[in-house]
Image (spheres, grey):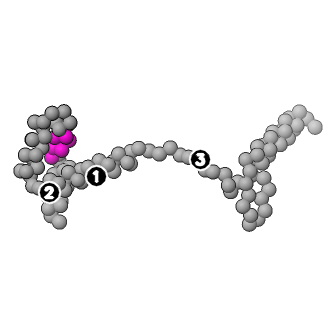
Amino acid sequence: MSNADLSEFYGRIARIEKARALGYGFEAEGTLGRSYYRKPRKRSRSIVAPVIFSLMCVIGMKGALHHQIGDAIYDARVERLMQGDGFERLGGYLMQADPATLFVSKKLSTL
């Protein structure tokens, strides 16, 4: 036997031992072997979908509120918030009627 044949043989033995250690050994037909019980790897989750969903919910709520109380009252309340201190001013800035809010309000009025 040549040296190349011997290294190929030992390489194959190493692959077989590694597979058996992972549970890929002999499994009888119709039984649940060790490979069945291996837990799948956890995959990382993306944060994009939850952020987009949250933004859609906020815009929907703003649009519903704008539709419910009307344009003039909504703008008056936002102006009152903008004249406040700290977080009230931030709330007023966030609650301003943007194009998406007006679009949702207009679509709700057609329903």
Task: Residue under label 3, please give it.
Answer: 41
Instruction: Mark 2: give few (<14), some (14-19) or many (20+) Cα within 10 Å.
Output: some
Q: Position of residue 97 (x, y in %)?
A: 15, 46
Q: Which residues are magenta?
A: 90-97
Instruction: Determine if the magenta segment contains residue 50.
Output: no
Q: Amino acid at mark 3?
A: Arg
Vertical comparison of 24 with 109: above or below: above
Q: What secondary structure predominates along the stretch shown in magenta?
A: helix
Estimate the spatial distance between the alpha carbons at disc 1 and disc 2, rounded to whole Å.
Answer: 15 Å
**Which mark identifies residue 67?**
2
Estimate the spatial distance between the alpha carbons at disc 3 and disc 1, rounded to whole Å.
Answer: 32 Å
Instruction: Mark 1: give few (<14), some (14-19) or many (20+) Cα within 10 Å.
Output: few
Task: Residue under label 1, please give it.
Answer: 57
Circles 1 and 2: CB atoms closer than 8 Å? no
The C terminus appears in which quarter of the rendering? bottom left
Q: Position of residue 25 (x, y in %)?
A: 78, 53
The structure residue drawn at horizontal position 15% and vertical position 43%, both measured from the top left corner, is: 96
